[in-house]
Amino acid sequence: MPPLLLLFTAEAEAPAEEQILSPLQRAKKALDEESLDKDVLTSALADLEAEMNRLQSAASAAESRAATLEASVAAAKDQYLRLNADFDNFRRRTREESAQLTDSVRGDVIKEMLPLVDNFELARTQVKAETESEQKINNSYQSLYKQMVEMMRSLGVEAVPTTGTPFDPAIHDAIMREPSNTHPDGTVLQEFRKGFAIGGKLVRPAMVKVSYTEEGPANSSEE
């Protein structure tokens, strides 16, 4: 009978408390007590030690695989975080570009409407209703103008401040100068054409008349 089989047969007949011991411990115990043939036990012990070495090698390999797996998990996590950050940046850029595109489209639409706004403004200042029929027409005209102004306001369009404000070359186009001793130098005295902006971005500058003192005209930036 093979040595290991003899050993396992002896193990099967051993008391329950002895079976709790590891095979290596039982083999050493039996060898010390001379309960089996020493050659058989020596051979079995060698087999068990070889098995222990194999298990230790397997454990080392498992630890190595675990370390490799842990490194792979860490790399995958790092890659996920980078991809997530890239996606967040992409989403933010998309929102910003979409907002810029929306503002650009709005600006183009408003620019197309500006000649109509100018005509309404001109009619509002020049038309003088003298009869009841003319007044009704003028009221309808003004109602349409008011609706257009409300629509532009809903699109975020704002009129550029003019009369009474300091001249600002970023939003004003000075087409006339007038000497004045009652206004500070460079004050907008009159608006000839409205200017508009969307979200703080200028769509069209306002055409204005600017004051200057008798000593001389305002600085050349007003030109």
Image (cartoon, helix red, strand yellow):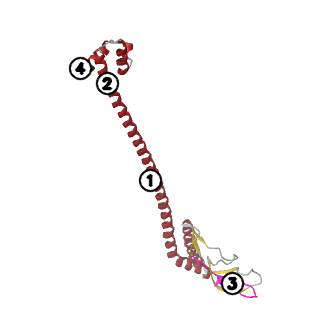
Mark 3 residue type: Asn
Please provide the residue range marked out in magenta: 204-223
Q: Is mark 1 on a helix, strand or loop?
A: helix
Which label sits in the foreground, 4 or 3? 4
> In the image, is 38 to the left or to the right of 137?
left
Between 6 and 185, the one nearer to me in the picture: 6
Which residue of the protein is positioned furthest toward the left in this rendering? 1
Residue 139 percent across, percent down from the top left: 58, 74
Between 75 and 153, the one nearer to me in the picture: 75
Mark 4 residue type: Pro
CA–CA distance in space, label 1 to label 2 = 55 Å
Q: Is mark 3 on a helix, strand or loop?
A: loop
Mark 1 residue type: Leu
Residue 87 percent across, percent down from the top left: 45, 55
Q: Mark 3 points at which residue?
A: 219
Checking the image for residue 2, the label placed there is 4
**Disc 1 and disc 3 in contact, CB within 8 angstroms:** no
**Disc 2 and disc 4 in contact, CB within 8 angstroms:** no
Residue 8 percent across, percent down from the top left: 29, 18
User: Which residue is painted at 32% across and 22% down in the image?
Assistant: 45
- Which quadrant holds the C terminus? bottom right
> In the image, is 131 to the left or to the right of 35?
right
Say whether disc 1 or disc 2 marks the residue closer to the N-terminus: 2
Say whether disc 2 or disc 4 marks the residue closer to the N-terminus: 4
Checking the image for residue 83, the label placed there is 1
CA–CA distance in space, label 2 to label 4 = 13 Å
CA–CA distance in space, label 4 to label 1 = 61 Å
Between 77 and 167, the one nearer to me in the picture: 77
Quarter-of-image position of residue 74: top left
Checking the image for residue 172, the label placed there is none
Mark 2 residue type: Ala
